[in-house]
Image: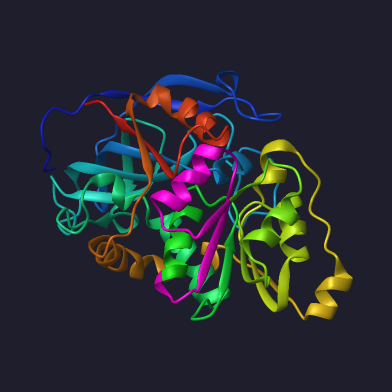
């Protein structure tokens, strides 16, 4: 069995020990050591380099839910987007030393089917963590281009615009010809990020009073597209300021998932009179978009697209806190943990 370097017999892993009631805390997880398996034919052993965290992980910690993904199992590590290096291989198509992306456990090493990893071109993107943007970027691309059909003349509103999906979605909308791009965020600092660094025309702090009024000031003629990544009162305010025949693409519900807020109310009278189109979407409905994203992302980065992200240097033990900080709004853009070797 080809191998690269010393492979330990055991590695640290973080297990989901109990289901959170509200935001996850350290008490919901347990750090342990698990065996490192020698990969069988058709499998590879990967040393984890970066583990991405995303808000959707919080909902997968619940026993139920409306996601097109199974909940995380108690007593097992949560899984998420990861990038690592192959250290032992049972498949010639995935050689030792290859950098790969995959959905992997919160652990120092992962034993994976070779068909479940994607060999990466290290020269395509600036750093390993950029490859972790594929789920978020693909979601943004699918929602903006394929569901909302953004094009020239559109006035686009993105909620949660400083997050991993929203920060890319607004920039994609601009590249598809939108006339005006507006974002919502939860602090003055994040609003400045949107307009100063990411090219949004306006940003509205959703925590301020009179959200609908502030959105009307930012879009006096109404919005023609709303990419909803939050739900809650932001959905209600967006419907209130929607222009006739606006398209609403619903791809997230963070307000309810994180704080337990009520599901948003739809003003059906406005929806009828304005002729609104409201459509939900999830990347699981269009996984083929993930194949398009890396090359598009590389090209857009060359044209000036910004990838706001936070890399936490640490150990696998630090992943739960990185997720908690993301959910609490302490980070901008995409968040990952770079594991020390």
Q: Is residue 278 left or right of residue 2?
A: right
Q: Is residue 207 left or right of residue 29?
A: right
Residue 104 is situated, as x and y percent measured from the top left of the image, at: 39, 43
Q: What quarter of the picture does the N terminus occupy?
A: top left
Q: Between residue 329 and residue 5, name the one nearer to us.
A: 329
Q: What quarter of the picture does the C terminus occupy?
A: top left
- The residue lying at 72 percent from left, 57 percent from top is 235
Q: Which image quadrant for residue 236? A: bottom right
- Say whether residue 146 is visible: yes
Which range of residues does the magenta coloring cover?
A: 175-203
User: How many circles with numbers are drawn on the protein?
Assistant: 0
Q: Between residue 94 and residue 234, name the one nearer to us.
A: 234
Q: Does 298 sit above or below residue 72?
A: below
- Say whether residue 250 is visible: no
Residue 191 is situated, as x and y percent measured from the top left of the image, at: 52, 45
- The residue lying at 29 percent from left, 36 percent from top is 48
Q: Between residue 290 and residue 259, name the one nearer to us.
A: 259
Residue 185 is situated, as x and y percent measured from the top left of the image, at: 58, 46
């Amino acid at each position: 069995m080809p191998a690269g370097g010393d492979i330990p017999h055991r590695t640290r892993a973080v297990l989901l020990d109990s289901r959170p009631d509200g935001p996850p805390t350290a008490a919901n997880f347990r750090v342990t050591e698990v065996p490192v398996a020698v990969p069988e034919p058709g499998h590879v052993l990967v040393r984890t380099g970066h583990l991405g965290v995303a808000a959707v992980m919080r909902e997968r910690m619940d026993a139920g839910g409306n996601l097109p993904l199974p909940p995380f199992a108690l007593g097992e590590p949560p899984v998420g987007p990861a990038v690592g290096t192959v250290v032992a291989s049972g498949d010639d198509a995935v050689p030792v030393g290859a950098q790969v992306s995959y959905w992997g456990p919160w652990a120092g090493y992962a034993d994976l089917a070779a068909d479940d990893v994607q060999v990466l071109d290290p020269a395509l993107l600036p750093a390993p963590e950029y490859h972790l943007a594929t789920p978020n970027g693909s979601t943004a691309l699918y929602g903006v281009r394929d569901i909302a059909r953004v094009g020239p003349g559109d006035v686009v509103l993105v909620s949660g615009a400083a997050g991993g999906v929203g920060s890319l979605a607004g920039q994609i909308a601009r590249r598809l010809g939108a006339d005006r791009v507006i974002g919502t965020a939860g602090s003055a600092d994040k609003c400045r990020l949107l307009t100063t660094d990411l090219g949004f025309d306006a940003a509205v702090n959703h925590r301020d009073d009179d959200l609908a009024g502030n959105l009307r000031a930012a879009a006096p003629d109404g919005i023609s597209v709303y990419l909803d990544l939050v739900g809650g009162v932001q959905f209600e305010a967006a419907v209130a300021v929607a222009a006739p025949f606006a398209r609403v693409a619903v791809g997230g519900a963070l307000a309810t998932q994180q704080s337990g807020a009520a599901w948003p109310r739809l003003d059906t009278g406005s929806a009828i009179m304005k002729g609104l189109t409201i459509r939900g979407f999830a990347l699981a409905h269009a996984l083929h978009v993930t194949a398009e994203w890396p090359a598009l992302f590389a090209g857009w980065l060359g044209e000036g697209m910004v990838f706001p992200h936070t890399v936490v240097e640490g150990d696998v033990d630090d992943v739960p806190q990185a997720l908690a900080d993301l959910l609490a709004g302490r980070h901008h853009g995409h968040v990952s943990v770079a594991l020390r070797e």
